[in-house]
Image: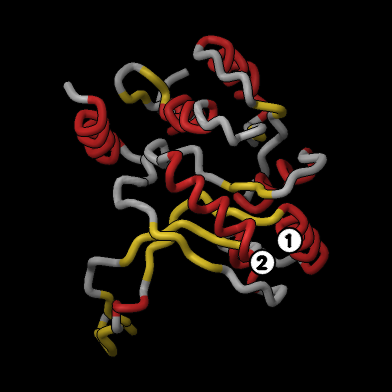
Amino acid sequence: MGAGHNKLFLELREKPILIHTLEVFEQDSACKGIWLAVKPEEREYIQSLLVKYNIKKVKALPDGGTERQDSVYSCVKKVKDGEIVLVHDAARPFITIPVIHKLVEAAEENGAVIAGVRTKDTIKKVENGVIVETVDRSNLWMIQTPQAFQFTILQEAERAAEKDQFLGTDEAMLVERLGQVVHIVESSYDNVKITTKEDLVFGEAILSQRIGG
């Protein structure tokens, strides 16, 4: 399967990005299961990757939807029970187990929490090609995944969004609209989403720094 089909199959050091990501959770003893939304036409290939790389924690491969929200809800419906669930972009292979554990602990205490980093860039508001405001960046964060929730909170938020035909940009937004306070845990700038060949170059640099060579 070539990279032109699904960016998750792009390879870092001869291993698909998808597998790099899954291996983090596979190696986390606290992770009890993985639900991975997939395109029906890619299910067989992904199953072969799971076997090849000995990924055993994947419980189900439900059909993904047109929108991210649909894919997440498809997975939520497959989860029979659980205390804390994490929603993670499979294209972020550099998430670390310590950050995952911080998110889980915060979700246990607060109900809903997301990963993020403080913005380092100057942010400006622009209208019709003209800068109208320089935004104070001291309280601005760039949001990443995982996003962690007590299972019943996420389940209720997904059900309400489906009922109201509401489309959010992430799961935190669905939870927020129900009045739930969402907290944030500081992650790492390494936790990048790899979607382009330029991102792959950055990813190679991160791997070199982490494992050498």
| Residue 131 placement (x, y as % from top left) | 25, 85
- Locate residue 142: give its quadrant: bottom left
Residue occupying the point 17% across, 21% down: 213
Residue position marked by numbered label 1 in the rendering: 153
- Do labels 1 and 2 touch, CB within 8 Å? yes
Specify which label sits upstream in the sequence, 1 or 2.
Answer: 1
| Residue 191 placement (x, y as % from top left) | 36, 46
| Residue 179 placement (x, y as % from top left) | 69, 77
166 in relation to 67, above or below:
below
Report crowding for label 2: few under 14, some 14 to 19, many 20 or more residues within 10 A (C-alpha): many
Residue 125 located left or right of residue 90: left
Looking at the rendered structure, the secondary structure element under dot 2 is helix
Residue occupying the point 79% across, 65% down: 160
Real-space Cα separation, disc 1 to disc 2, in angstroms: 7 Å
| Residue 121 placement (x, y as % from top left) | 23, 68
Specify the farthest residue to the left. Answer: 213
Q: Amino acid at mark 1?
A: Ile
Residue occupying the point 59% across, 63% down: 172
Residue position marked by numbered label 2 in the rendering: 175
Residue occupying the point 48% across, 64% down: 184
Residue 167 located left or right of residue 164: left
